[in-house]
Amino acid sequence: MQKLWGGRFSKQTDTSAEDFTASVQFDYRLASYDIQGSIAHTRMLKKCEILTEREESLIIEGLNGIQQDIQTNNFLFDPQLEDVHMNIEHALIQRIGEVGKKLHTARSRNDQIALDTRLYLREELKQIITLNSSFQSAILSIAEKNIEIIMPGHTHLQHAEPVLFAHHIMAYFWMSERDRQRFIDCLKKINILPLGACALAGTSLPIDREYTANLLDFPGVTENSIDTVSDRDYILEFLSAASICMMHLSRLSEELIIWSTHEYRWVDIDEAFCTGSSIMPQKKNPDICELTRGKTGRVYGNLFNLLTLMKSLPLSYNRDMQEDKEPLFDTVDTLKQCLCIYSRLITSLKINAERMKLSIAMDSSWATEMANYLVRKGIPFRQAHHISGRIVAANRDVSEWTLQELQEFSELFENDIFDVIKPEYGINQKNSAGGTSSKQVKKQIEEAKKVFSDASDAEKRLPGA
Ligand code: ARG
């Protein structure tokens, strides 16, 4: 087959080289963005009098026809034509003849691919932000529904101090809020027109980049043509933001896996989101959580793939960069899937308040409040810490102590100590801003709702919307 770039070649490309260089088997996913970009480019060429009105309408009609064929599955992507750009351009020439050969004026595949991925990621990010918001809203609703439930808070995976379950789970809301902001930030960086950088140096033809930017809803154009065709930062930033988001989902997964063990039984993951065992009839496994934890590895891998790919590339475009597509697509697909299923899993999650309470009854997480009690009676904290520590070391259930026995550790103990060491007391005393008291957690939830509703308003005004 005669290549669109074949002028200087007298030999056919070896089939192994064709297979090796082809990317259409994955970059076909960019087809509709490629066409959208080509239509805007054509309109700009006409506006700049590089194309006539008739040429413009023939090309646009041709491109729309191709778009339709793709949508109705009547388009055959041919690996011999290398990539999505060549497949579409070739089809255009087949369809409308010679005039189709004018489309690629003042354009290179180097700026074209930068445009396609920006358009693609801009669209996908909007969906990701919406899915992220659904996840946040699932967290908010489970926090509100279980607002009074008490659980042991951990450090080092050891019982530390009792907290409200709502407080613990709302930690994920704020992580997710930062994820949302990171995605919005990515969107801002993506939202700039690369087209017009051409191969690397711009063009001697009289183009109007601002006009194309306007047509494609980009607020501006890139400043440096060499940077434009060399840059994959916007993909790297997205892969980083996606990795952090997956890390959050993975930590939540880990907690849910632990909490649903027989030893804990703190939560019950809905059967609709579990799977069974082919041999052990009793099994109900938290596979969604495990797979989310597992898929985090592949998203990190995608980030490291591209970081490594880019690290030694000289300016400007290098064909290595074609390898950015699969990690990008895989990350988008994986992240969307995980966010989507997690909203549903969290919404149907049941919390076992009794089991959570029971595990506090058998621990020593009252020790800090006992020390604080002595501090309020005038003892320096270090000494109070020591006294409380001695009582812990006696290794008795806290309910078994009498006042007299406690007074042997400190005369300052009075009857009210038995209230102070109740988990509810400690929780409600922790009324510092952002603390676990009921009052603070309710305030936090109100604040989260405010952030969330401001965010949904802002989502309607996202760039390129
Ligand atoms: N398919 C390439 C990519 O994904 C774009 C084409 C650039 N090719 C070239 N020979 N300059 O990066």
Image (cartoon, rainbow, N blue to C red):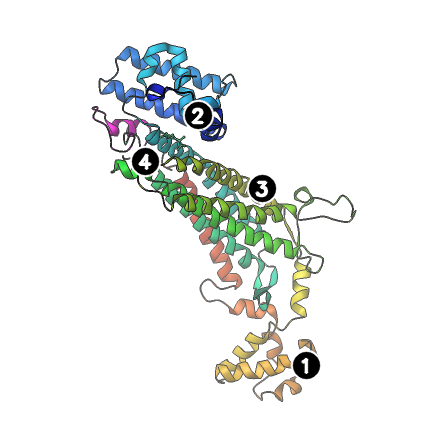
Inter-mark Cα distance, 3 to 1: 48 Å
Identify which residue, 455 or 71, lies in the foreground.
71
Q: Which stretch is magenta?
A: 198-218
Does the magenta-highlighted stretch encompass residue 277? no
Can you tell which of label 4 and label 2 is closer to the viewer? 2
Residue drawn at (62%, 53%) of the image = 256
Earlier-in-chain disc, 1 versus 4:
4
Q: CA distance from mark 4 to mark 2?
A: 19 Å
- Identify the residue under disc 1: 401
Q: Amino acid at mark 1?
A: Trp
* Picture coordinates of residue 128, whole percent (x, y): 47, 40
Secondary structure of the residue carrying tag 4 is helix
Residue on which disc 4 sits: 229
Q: Which residue is mark 3?
A: 341
Cα distance between the residues tagged 1 and 4: 73 Å
* Rendered-image quarter of ligand 1: top left
Which of label 3 and label 4 is nearer to you? 4
Q: Which mark is nearer the camera, 3 or 1?
A: 3
